[in-house]
Amino acid sequence: MLYYCMDCKRVFNNSSECTYCSCNNVKKLNQNAPVNVIGSKIKGRILKAKSDNVRLIYVDSHKNTIIKDFDVDKIRKIL
Ligand SMILES: [Zn+2]
């Protein structure tokens, strides 16, 4: 189960507090949630969330639909 922080938008697997900013404003990361990959222009949706990585579906700059796994620490929730 993965969660995201309502304050800094980072994703992690701690249900009680944010791993990055220690706030308690944490919500469950649902399937199909919109996210981006930190340090890239990739914006996609959660296809499958595991404990330390997520499978995203996104459209690349050539309009190809890509399905790819990313580490959880590279993911940020988009509101
Ligand atoms: Zn945070």
Image (cartoon, rainbow, N blue to C red):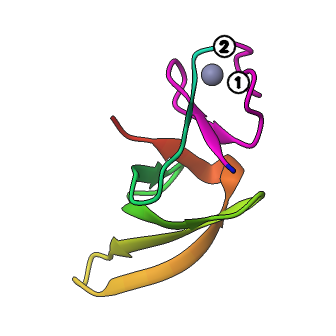
Q: Please identify the dominant SS of the magenta region.
A: loop
Label 2 near label 1: C-beta < 8 Å? yes
Magenta span has 18? Answer: yes
**Ligand 1 contact, mark 1 (Cβ < 8 Å):** yes
Which of 27/73 is in front? 27
12 in relation to 41, above or below: above
- Residue 55 location, quadrant: bottom right
Residue that carries the numbered disc 1 in the rendered image: 18
The magenta stretch spans which residues?
A: 2-23
Q: Which residue: 61% across, 74% down?
A: 69
Residue that carries the numbered disc 2 in the rendered image: 24
Which of 32/9 is in front? 32
Which of 3/19 is in front? 3
Q: Please tell me how crowded label 2 is: few (under 14), some (14-19), or many (20+) other residues with Cα within 10 Å.
A: some
| Left or right relative to 77: residue 13 | right
Q: Quadrant of ligand 1?
A: top right
Q: Which residue: 53% across, 50% down?
A: 39
Pick whichever of labels 1 and 2 is earlier in the sequence: 1
74 in relation to 79, above or below: below
Q: Which residue: 28% across, 87% down?
A: 64
Magenta span has 8? Answer: yes
